[in-house]
Amino acid sequence: MKLSDFAIKRPVTMLMVVVVILILGFVSVSKMSIDLLPDVDVPVIVVLTTYPGAASEEIEDTITKPVEKSVSGVENVKTILSDSQPNVSVVQVRFKWGTDLDIAAMNVREKLDLIRRTLPENAEAPIVLKMDPSMMPVLILGMEGERDTMYLRQLADDTIVKQIERVEGVSSVIMVGGAQRQVRVRVYPDKLSGYKVAFSQVISALKAGNINVPAGEVDYGNRELLVKTTGEFQDVEEIKNLVVVNRQGAIVRLRDIADVQDAEEEVKIYSRINKNDGLR
């Protein structure tokens, strides 16, 4: 018997079937959750490795290719995309849908641990990040003013960013644009040779002279106080007067072999607000 014949001969039964279907439909719609930004696990993991001072070709040969070869053996890998830029290597690993990203991230970290010693000594440890759509910015603020961008960035770092981070629900704040303060030390090779000072000694002196060292604990009545020795540089003059070498009273200071300047770092990302330099 055809469905049309059954509907004509038993109209009451068909009416009841239609009513039941409508009721189930209304119940399903009322219980269906609706989310403007649903939580979706995108099967993508990003490996970020920083190598300061390295060119794109060096980044590709010494970091990107070894990382690609290492993570290619992880289970359920679909495709691998990479981008080698000056100072940084970005390797994007795409997995098959349904892959548990927590397990995949753990497997990727294990593979990277095996090649960590083969990477350049000055390269930072690879960072493994899971692609999370909820980490995309939901609000972008622009900032401009009559002062230079270095002052604006310092003002934003010290006050505005901290206040925004205190807002409930804010995960992180990222600032783009503007110049940052940078102390430049230009070492003169002829003076190094004249004072018989190695370049490595200059680096060691700068590292040792710019560090805070914990000095233990002191009992003060019913309280316990933490003690530390403050050794970080406070101003440029202190850096200039840094002792690099002391040979039985013959002191060689940094100002004797180098030029120290309070300057700005090279701006690599520019942000324009209303056609003016600013921050966002």
Image: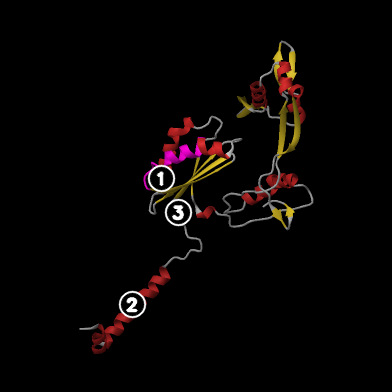
**Which residue type does callout 2 highlight?**
Ile
The verdict on residue 68 being magenta is yes
Image spot of residue 250 (x, y percent): 74, 13
Identify the element where label 1 is drawn: helix
Spot occupied by residue 245 in the image (x, y as percentages of width and height):
70, 17
Q: Earlier in the sequence, mark 1 or mark 3?
A: 3
The image quadrant that residue 25 belongs to is bottom left
**Residue plotted at (47% across, 31% down):** 118
The residue positioned farthest toward the front in the image shown: 57
The CA distance from mark 2 to mark 3 is 35 Å
Q: x, y percentage for residue 135?
A: 54, 52
| Type of secondary structure dominating the magenta stretch | helix
Residue extending farthest to the bottom is 9
Residue 77 versus residue 252: which sits nearer the camera?
77
Q: Which residue is mark 2?
A: 21
Give the x, y percent position of residue 210: 67, 28
- Res. 42 mark: 3
SS under mark 2: helix
What distance separates the C-alpha of mark 1 from that of mark 2? 43 Å
Q: How is the image coloured?
A: secondary structure
- Indicate the amino acid at tag 3: Val
Residue 19 shown left or right of residue 265 in the figure: left
Label 3, residues with CA under 10 Å away: few <14, some 14-19, many ≥20:
some
Q: Residue furthest left?
A: 1
Quadrant housing the N terminus: bottom left
Mark 1 vs mark 2: give the one in front: 1
**Earlier along the polypeptide chain: callout 2 or callout 3?**
2
Which stretch is magenta? Answer: 62-76
Instruction: Judge the density around disc 1: few (<14), some (14-19), many (≥20) Cα neighbours within 10 Å.
Output: many
| Residue identified by numbered label 1 | 104
